[in-house]
Amino acid sequence: MNLALLLQGKGWDGAKNLVRAPMSPTPSPSPEREGNLALYIHWPFCVSKCPYCDFNSHVRAAVDQEHWRAALLADLTHEAERLPHRRLTSIFFGGGTPSLMPPATVAALIEAACTYWPADPNIEITLEANPSSVEAARFADLAAAGVNRVSLGLQSLDDETLRFLGRAHGVCEGLAALDTAQAEFARVSFDLIYALPGQSVNAWRRELTRALAFGTGHLSLYQLTIEPGTRFATLLARGELAPPDPDLGADLFALTREMTEAAHVPAYEISNHARAGEESRHNLSYWRYRDYAGIGPGAHGRRCGARTQRHRKPENWLAAVGARGHGIAEEEALANRERATEALLMGLRLAEGIDLDRDDLDYATMIDRRAVDRLARQGLLAEHGHRLSATPAGMPVLDAILAEIAL
């Protein structure tokens, strides 16, 4: 079983040169088109490319901010036309490095989204941020724009490790940004990467102990994975980087679960840990297989039984928006079986598991009941009423479990 693979695991007056279709008449509501909606907004630009990163991020010498704001608003309008009668429960600005976005652009997108869809009174608006002093200086303006949750890419509490990971900040700068974030935002999360080459169990124990003492309500703790096309993959192929040790990874995974549970920030998803009520509502929409719209370069969406994907390269996405009013490269209707399979793969990552009785997903035709019963007897799966979940013993071997139970 490959633990590393398992664990990896967001009308404008300034619009110019854009072809914008008018908003179509709003159709009458129907039950399958109503309900909650999450919105992901992708900002693709970074100051530099980290050697482990395979996300859709790009380094550009200059960005025409006015043009980008107009294009994102046009892409958003396209999604709003296709998703009437929804309630907006979350917005997630991901990247790339969305903390490089001008706060005015963030504010314009939030305002437009909450105009198209009524916002839940407790809407969660998250922005991913690098913990540099330059970006931390924008936190107050981002909070004023409407962001109420920030996710900081600390990645490590060791300067040598940060250099290895290609990060531009040091530990002191990162912790200063964390202090600023905790002062400006109602909710704060940060990321750490572990199972690094040469990292010992005791070293990770010390680092995680320090991280848990900061008092944040949410932690995303990921094992290092070597993704194709990254700088680390090139180094690994040359023999210049040690491959991840799966046995060490398993030990560190167990330790992480033990320590976060004791600190009352237990794992609610395979790599995400939170105090009760601090879970990422936006990401729960993904894992619970709910509808979400995705705009911006490379953004994925899932809505009304279809999957969408935007053009990945920023210039291609801009050109598509200019020509058609949206950046969609692919839109595909999902068969019922495919939807159920995806929901199973996503939902069993959660501690709460999946609801086998969901009327919009036909689990019965694609789950091997004999395999489920066998794995339950082995203590790897649990059924409570109509819910199926992986046990603490089963979560580290979830990919093997999924291979067993999916017909």
Image (spheres, rainbow, N blue to C red):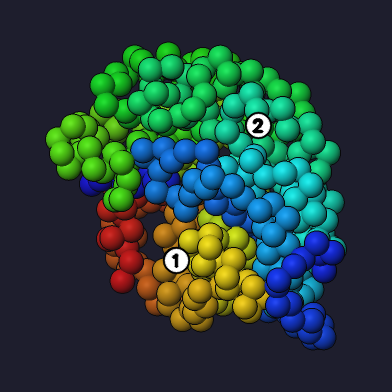
Residue 242 position, x and y percent, is 20, 31
Residue of label 2:
135
Secondary structure under the numbered disc 2 in the rendered image: helix
Q: Give the residue displayed 28% in from the left and 60% down from the top.
A: 403
Where residue 329 is drawn, which disc sits there?
none
* Quarter-of-image position of residue 27: bottom right
Q: In the depicted view, which residue is nearer to us: 186 or 40?
A: 40
Residue 336 position, x and y percent, is 48, 79
Secondary structure under the numbered disc 1 in the rendered image: helix
Q: In the depicted view, which residue is nearer to us: 123 or 67?
A: 67
Left or right of 152 in this view: 255? left
Residue 146 position, x and y percent, is 80, 44
Bin the neighbour count of mark 1 within 10 Å (Cα to Cα): few under 14, some 14-19, many 20 and up.
few
| On screen, residue 120 above or below 17 | above
Mark 1 or mark 2: name the one nearer the start of the chain. 2
Where residue 342 is drawn, which disc sits there?
1
